[in-house]
Structures are given as structure tokens and as C-alpha cells.
Image (cartoon, rainbow, N blue to C red):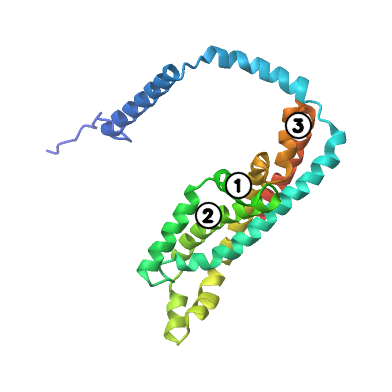
Amino acid sequence: MTNKKTPSNDKISIVSRKFVIRTVITIAVVILLYIASLFATDADPANLIRGFAILWDMIFTDFLPPDWSYFSTSFEYLVETWNIALLSTTFAAIVALPLTFLASNNINKNPRLYRVVRNALNFLRTIPDLILAILVVAFLGMGSVSGIIALTIFTSGILAKMLSETTEGINQGPLDAITASGGNLLQVIHYGVMPQILPYYASYTLYVLEMNVKASVVLGFIGAGGIGQLLNRNMSFFRYDRLMMILIVLFVTISIIDFVSNRW
């Protein structure tokens, strides 16, 4: 006589009970933190909701339509902003390349020098570009040169950091083969490393260029040149129609850079 097993009605849970409890607790803690922040800052959500109506009216009354006659002036300052971003990106790309190899443990075999360079790159990235620009302006005065130097220092650290992490993850086989055949360090970099990181190098450089265009706009507010000075001037005179024209020009420029970067 065979024993027939009755089908079990027990449901197999996709996630564990422990995971569900942790998720619920996390969500509850986040909600409590939001509530606590509202009380700590004396924020009033009702005022925020009422402010949307004012913002909506401001957009369609003050910002629109834009002052199309201001395009030529906006484009003139945009060219200066573009020059600041392009020059700082070019200098950063040049400076970042040797720093990349010094900050890669598969290229730089000196552990002390490797740690020094990595810590220096981390330190550079912790200083905001706005603070760097203020310091450079204090030493060199107002103008485009201060913006170029500040952005070069800031973005060279970012670019070297990203490239060094990419270099550490490349295929080690070609590097070992070149070394085994008697190649020196420069030959290893030229024939083994550069062909592997070159696409990333170009992509990261375009990303830094896009970032520098946006950063140079902000730096213009503190006297580092570019279209930021024009923005600050029109904000002071409440010329929001001209501000809208400037924003349109910036939006089109950044969109073009982003399109080129994605196509690359």
C-alpha cells in the first residue's frame, strides 16, 4: 500500500521575515527623522504648498516670455564661460594623466608614494570648487584666470581618481607580457595601459567638461568671469526675462555636450 503525500499549503516567502522587519523599521525611522526635521527647522508644509502658486505665477509673469533680444549678449558671455571650462578641462586632463599612474597600484609599485598620491587626490576632492575659487581670487584677483586655475585644480583630482580606479581594473596580461619581454615602465604604459583606458579617458574628460561648464557659471558669481557674472547682474536688477534667456542658452549648451558625451 503506497502512502500518498498530501500537497502542503505552506507558502514559501520570497523575502525573509527578518528582511521585512528591517525594512519596516528603516522606513519608520526615516519618517520620524523627516518629522523631527520639520519641528527642528520650524518648517510649515502649508506655506510650501501655497508657495507653488506664487512660483507658478512668477514663471509665467516674470520669466516668460524671455528677452530674445538679449541672446547676443548671453552668447558673448557664454563663449567666455566655454573658454574657461575648455581650458580648465584641457589642463586637468594633462595634469591628471601622470597622477593616474602614480595613484594606480598596478603601475606604481612604491607603496608610500602610492598612498601619498591617493591621499592628495582625496584631499583635493574634499575642497569644493567654490572655496578653491574664492582662495584663488583672493591671491590673483577677479577674472577668468582665477576660474581656470580653480577648476583645473579641482577637476584634475576628480579625473585622476576616476582614471586610477579604471587603470587598476584593466587586464593585467598585456602589462605582464610587455614587462616579461624587457619593456620598461613607459613602454608598459604606452602599449599596455593606454589602449585599455583611452575610451574611458575620453568619456571622463567629456564628463569633466560638462561639469566645468556648470561650475564656471557658479564661479562667475564670485568674480571668476563668465556668464555667472551676467546672471548675478540681472538678478540684482530683477530682469527675470533676461535670466530666462541666459538659462535657455545654458540648457542648450549643456544638452549638446551631454549628447556628444553619450554618443562617444
Give the camera-side residue of 169 and 160.
160
Give the camera-side residue of 58 and 149.
149
Residue at x 61% of width, y 13% of height: 50
Give the camera-side residue of 89 and 52.
89
- Report the disc number at residue 138: 1
Which is nearer the N-term, disc 1 or disc 3?
1
In the rendered image, the residue lying farthest to the left is 1
Q: Nearer the viewer, mark 1 or mark 3?
A: 1
Circles 2 and 3, Cβ within 8 Å, touching? The answer is no
Residue 242 appears in view:
yes
In the rendered image, the vertical position of residue 66 relative to residue 182, given as above or below = above
Residue 175 lies, in percent from the top left, at 46, 76
Residue linked to disc 3: 234
Task: Quote the CA–CA distance across marks 1 and 3.
Answer: 25 Å
Horizontal side, residue 42 vs residue 33: left or right: right
Q: Nearer the viewer, mark 2 or mark 3?
A: 3
